[in-house]
């Protein structure tokens, strides 16, 4: 299923401070990708740090798969990691360091990604 009606947006606003939310967001995103859905993870606040090398590797939730593995599966299966540019710049992060598969994209690019169809939205 690759039509616009099959799109999923996962909104994630937390990073290291809440490993459980990050883990669940990636579990939901990778499950949607496995079902053939197009998935964009829109990161805001501290979650924009996921776009930097090594950040996902340092997040683990007890009893759950490592976020680093889920993060890699997400990107390998075609998930798009969208980093809120306002949040990214407010934290003084280096745009040149953004990992492959991630990009700065705010509200307008998110709406363009959704297109004229609809999207199922999960927020963590």
Image (spheres, rainbow, N blue to C red):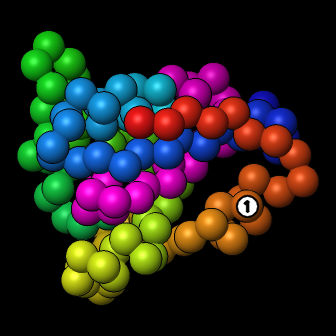
Counting from the top left corner in percent of width and height, residue 31 is at 51, 24
- Measuring 13% from the left and 32% from the top, which residue is drawn there? 60
- Measuring 20% from the left and 64% from the top, which residue is drawn there? 53
Q: Is the C terminus in the top left, top right, bottom left or bottom right quadrant?
A: top left
Counting from the top left corner in percent of width and height, residue 26 is at 39, 34
Counting from the top left corner in percent of width and height, residue 2 is at 78, 39
Classify 118 as above or below 95. above
Query: In the image, 55: left or right of 10?
Result: left
- Measuring 83% from the left and 36% from the top, which residue is drawn there? 5
60 within the magenta span: no
Query: In the depicted view, which residue is nearer to us: 115 or 71?
Result: 115
Q: Which residues are magenta?
A: 30-50
Classify 88 as above or below 19. below
Q: Quadrant of residue 71?
A: top left
- Residue 72 visible? The answer is no
Mark 1, residue position: 111
Outermost residue, right direction?
Answer: 116
47 within the magenta span: yes
Query: In the depicted view, which residue is nearer to us: 9 or 75?
Result: 9
Classify 65 as above or below 117. above
- Residue 61 visible? The answer is yes
Query: In the image, 85: left or right of 40?
Result: left
- Measuring 65% from the left and 61% from the top, which residue is drawn there? 110
């Amino acid at each position: 299923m690759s039509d616009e009606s099959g799109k999923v947006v996962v909104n994630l606003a937390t990073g290291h401070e809440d490993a459980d939310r990050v883990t669940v967001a990636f579990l939901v995103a990778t499950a949607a990708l496995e079902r053939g859905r197009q998935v964009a993870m829109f990161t805001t606040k501290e979650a924009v740090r996921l776009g930097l090398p090594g950040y996902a590797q340092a997040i683990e939730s007890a009893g759950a798969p490592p976020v680093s593995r889920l993060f890699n599966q997400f990107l390998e299966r075609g998930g798009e990691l969208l980093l809120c540019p306002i949040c990214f710049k407010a934290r003084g992060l280096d745009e040149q360091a953004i990992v492959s598969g991630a990009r700065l994209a705010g509200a307008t690019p998110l709406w363009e990604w959704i297109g004229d169809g609809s999207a199922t939205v999960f927020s963590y």
